[in-house]
Image: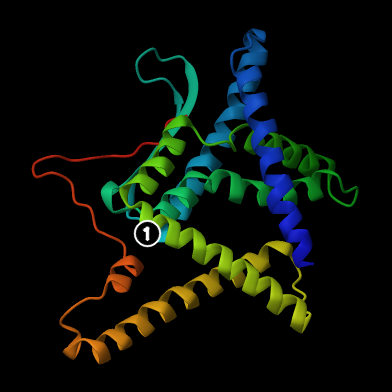
Amino acid sequence: MFGEVLLISLSVFPFIYLIGYASYKFLYVKDLGSIGNTFKHLLFFVGVIVHELSHRTMCAITGVPAYNTRVKYRDETSGRAAPHGSVTPRQRFQMSFLQAFLVCFAPLLIGAWIIYFLLQVALSSSFDPVLRIIAAFCSISILLASSPSRGDLSFVKFGYQNDPQHSQYQIFLVILSFLISWGLVGAFNIILPYEFFYYFIIILGYIILKYSLISINILVGKIRYRKGRIQSKVKRRLIRRRFRPETGKRYYMDYEE
């Protein structure tokens, strides 16, 4: 079962990303006439709502303070239909690589599973036809808005460059947690009702590893360095360096679609 989760991670997510991005680029610039354009904009609008809510949800999960979640159907300048939105996280300079990565790809990670459940409704004859049509409409809409924007991707790079050493440490912990989780699931034959529940095992493993290493390092530091007054080089690697905005300036990170 855990192997299926790996297969989904390595194939389904990139597949949805590429299909969603290509479909978005192809359809967004197409002129479908008055009625067709209205339908197209409604299709994108639903996806933008899920896109921005996914960003905001992941901000809450990863502990990134955020505000000013906006979803607009029309362009503020021209007044023409142009669905778009944004989320503004606070403390941009304090986001780690892992936080930036998860917030950036939240519409893909969350949207993929929403599409999965919607397709189960849309393709099942046991549901009402109207409900199946709505589910199909929403699944296509979410697919079109699942890919991160350029602004989203730029902050993943920004998060890594803020502290490359700590970013590499986070990547190492994620890989180690994944391998340990895979071993435990196989050894104890853990079977969960839905595949995405296995991600919680990986998350729990990451948290346990992170704080276990920090606790061990602090304990060793107290023993080795009298009352912990001197930090070891290892401890500095385990704790992310904090970044602060320049005095008098405010920074925002928008996810514009």
Q: Position of residue 40 (x, y in %)?
A: 63, 21
Of residues 246 and 218, the one drawn nearer to the viewer in this rendering:
218
For the view shown, which residue lies furthest in the right direction? 125
Numbered marks: total:
1
Q: Residues within 10 Å of mark 1 (few under 14, many from 20)?
A: many
Q: Position of residue 177 (x, y in %)?
A: 57, 70
Look at the picture and state if 49 lies above or below 163. Answer: above
Residue depicted at x 73% and y 42%: 135
Residue depicted at x 86% and y 44%: 123
Quarter of the rendering occupied by the N terminus: bottom right
Give residue 62's quadrant in the image.
Answer: bottom left
Residue depicted at x 50% and y 58%: 171
Residue depicted at x 62% and y 25%: 24
Q: Look at the image and tell me whether residue 105 can be seen.
A: yes
Q: Position of residue 170 (x, y in %)?
A: 45, 61
Of residues 47 and 213, the one drawn nearer to the viewer in this rendering:
213
Q: Look at the image and tell me whether residue 90 can be seen.
A: no
Q: Horizontal placement of 216 versus 251: left or right?
A: right
Check disc 1 and report its element: helix, strand or loop.
helix
Of residues 139 and 79, the one drawn nearer to the viewer in this rendering:
139
Give the colour scheme of this rendering: rainbow
* Amino acid found under the numbered disc labelled 1: His
Q: Horizontal placement of 100 versus 202: left or right?
A: left
Q: Position of residue 213 (x, y in %)?
A: 41, 78
Residue under numbered circle 1: 166
